[in-house]
Image: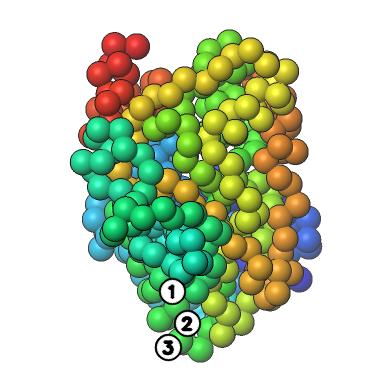
Amino acid sequence: MIPVLVTHAHGYLGRHVVAHLQAQGHEVIARDTLRPAEDLEQALRGVQAVVHLTDPLHPLDCDGDRLEGGPAEGLDPLHGLLRAMCAAGVGRLVLQSSLGVYGEGRYVDEDGRPHAVWRTPSDLKVGVWEARGFHNQPLAPMPTPEDAAPAPLSPEARLCHLRERLARRWARVAGAEIAVLRMGRLFGPPMGGEGFCGGIGMMVASLLAGKPPLLMEDGGQTEDWLHVRDAARAVGLAVMNCDRRMPPLNISTGEGHTAREAARLAGMAAFDYGTAPKEARVACPGTSRHLVGAPGAAAERIGFTAETRLANGLGELVQWTRDRGIPHHDRLHLRKLQAAGRLVGPGRAELVQA
């Protein structure tokens, strides 16, 4: 086992990563900030690997303000970290990324040929939710493999891809080992008291309050939901198995669930079979319609396979939410997004009046 420095160690994923690494016998240096540089260089002395965690991409998974600067400002912390790693002689990096770098992901036609798809803001404004191809031909979404070309849709996803490129370029120049982990959307209870559980957590809190969960768009968008403990386990495997030639890895289940399906499963876990979800009929531009990661390479390269499926992991989240009396706040969250200009769609007026 080795000394490992973890950034954003007090965040939702960070607490789970620290606990998992410690349980595996690693010495963990937990950092929540990368400044000042002198403190970071001191913390890196004797460290053999760094785990760099980042904020979630999806607006429903974010508690608080999003990026305040552009991509250049957003890359500054990673720039500083990589410089400090070089100075300290640390040659192993595990970088958290997201399936969101793929954009809309892989779609194929009836002959199995891949096609580019998109959703324009004007489509979303009038409630056309499905992505479409150039000729509007029928297309089917498929799990997206690691060799798919990145096509990030939002500023946050583009920044995530820029982090990947910067880290991989540093690794080539420094001769360092690197693992880039493109994770699905996280769910599961936080560690260390109250916390924010993202989109699934808001569904559960609404159901426990007897309120219908609000679904983005028409509830038909598909996500690859990854349990937070599976994500932490993947980080631990990457720490011990990354190498200089490792491609980016999808840390995902390979299974997609629509928002409506997720709400139904959350209702079953909460023993609420009568509260039907409500379509908000709004969308966040820059989010994908159907995005599932093909997970095979992670099993081959680091031995990772997701163990907790969405249906099996919701009961614990329901109990955690009930025990702590977490209030439902999905409507408040959407109003904040609307006030920030982050929502479009025919349901915007109803959201203001609700």
Gap in angstroms between the C-alphas marked 3 and 1: 10 Å
Q: In the image, what residue type sits under mark 1?
A: Ala
Q: Pick the residue in front: 334 or 82.
A: 334
Q: Which mark is residue 171?
A: 2
Tell whether label 2 touches label 3 (CB within 8 Å).
yes
Tell whether label 1 touches label 2 (CB within 8 Å).
yes
Res. 141 in view: yes
| SS category of the residue bearing label 1 | helix
89 is higher (above) or lower (below) than 349: below
Residue assigned mark 1 = 167
129 is higher (above) or lower (below) than 204: below
| SS category of the residue bearing label 3 | helix
Res. 45 in view: no
Q: Is residue 111 left or right of residue 18?
A: left
Gap in angstroms between the C-alphas marked 3 and 2: 6 Å
Q: Is residue 151 left or right of residue 296?
A: left
| SS category of the residue bearing label 2 | helix
Q: In the image, what residue type sits under mark 2?
A: Ala
Q: Which mark is residue 173?
A: 3
Residue at 29% across, 11% down? 353
Number of numbered discs: 3
Residue at 25% across, 18% down? 349
Tell whether label 1 touches label 3 (CB within 8 Å).
no
Give the crowd class for mark 2: few <14, some 14-19, many >=20 residues within 10 Å.
many
